[in-house]
Amino acid sequence: MSQPLIGVDLVPLARVGELLDPAAGPVLGRFLSAGELAASRTPDGEPDRAGIAGRLAAKEAVFKLLGAVGRPVPWQGIEVLRGPGGRPGVRLSGVAAELAQHAGLGPIDVSISHDGGFAIAVAAATTSRPSRPSHLAGSMTSTGSVTSTGSMTSTGSVTSKGMP
């Protein structure tokens, strides 16, 4: 039985300003691939701060699906590029692809939005693996679906056992 997974992340656009500061050096190239950097430009060639923040948020949201708590984010192995119709698409490679395979992830859908100085991204996938380590005290039930159009429905409840 497959189970839905959801990752979410929020990035302030001000953080992108810090990364673009010449005093910070060429930091952005460690986080974004050449293709992502090229896609993160405004029509006049300037860095698209909202687009960059959205890609960083999407990468973090995808990383949360991988279940690799305590490991460094494989920034270059998670690419967020424009897909058909301008929708964001995810391409995994290297360590990120290995982690996704180990987690039993199906295709990953991403939605990105930016407004009011922030970018937010949600990543969703399904897995056939248990969603929680058995040693955790709480229990979780969830039902949901993800459609190929990017819409998602999910209902669930979380109960705590033996927790104060």
Image (tube, grey):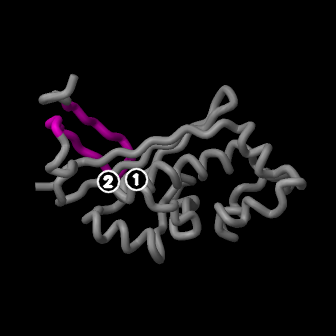
Image quarter for residue 45?
bottom right
User: Is 143 placed left or right of 18 in the picture?
Assistant: left
User: Please, what secondary structure does the residue beneath circle 2 have?
Assistant: strand
Q: Residue at x 65, y 61 (%)?
A: 31
Q: Mark 2: few, some, or many residues within 10 Å (few <14, many ≥20)?
A: many
Q: In the image, is residue 29 above or below residue 45?
A: below
Q: Give the label on residue 125, or none.
A: 2
Residue 89 location in percent, x, y? Answer: 49, 59
Q: Which kind of residue does numbered mark 1 sit on?
A: Asp
Q: Give the label on residue 19, or none.
A: none
Question: Magenta stretch?
Answer: 137-157
**Nearer-the-camera pick, 60 or 114:** 60
Q: Residue at x 81, y 51 (%)?
A: 20
Q: Alpha carbon of mark 1 to alpha carbon of mark 2: how far?
A: 6 Å
**The stretch drawn in magenta includes residue 138:** yes
User: Is 40 placed left or right of 55 in the picture?
Assistant: right
| Residues at circles 1 and 2 in contact by the CB criterion of under 8 Å | yes
Q: Give the label on residue 109, or none.
A: 1
Q: Which kind of residue does numbered mark 2 sit on?
A: Ala
Q: Mark 1: few, some, or many residues within 10 Å (few <14, many ≥20)?
A: many
Residue 122 location in percent, x, y? Answer: 44, 43
User: Please, what secondary structure does the residue beneath circle 1 have?
Assistant: strand
Residue 26 location in percent, x, y? Answer: 80, 63
**The stretch drawn in magenta includes residue 38:** no
Image quarter for residue 50?
top right
Q: Residue at x 44, y 68 (%)?
A: 96
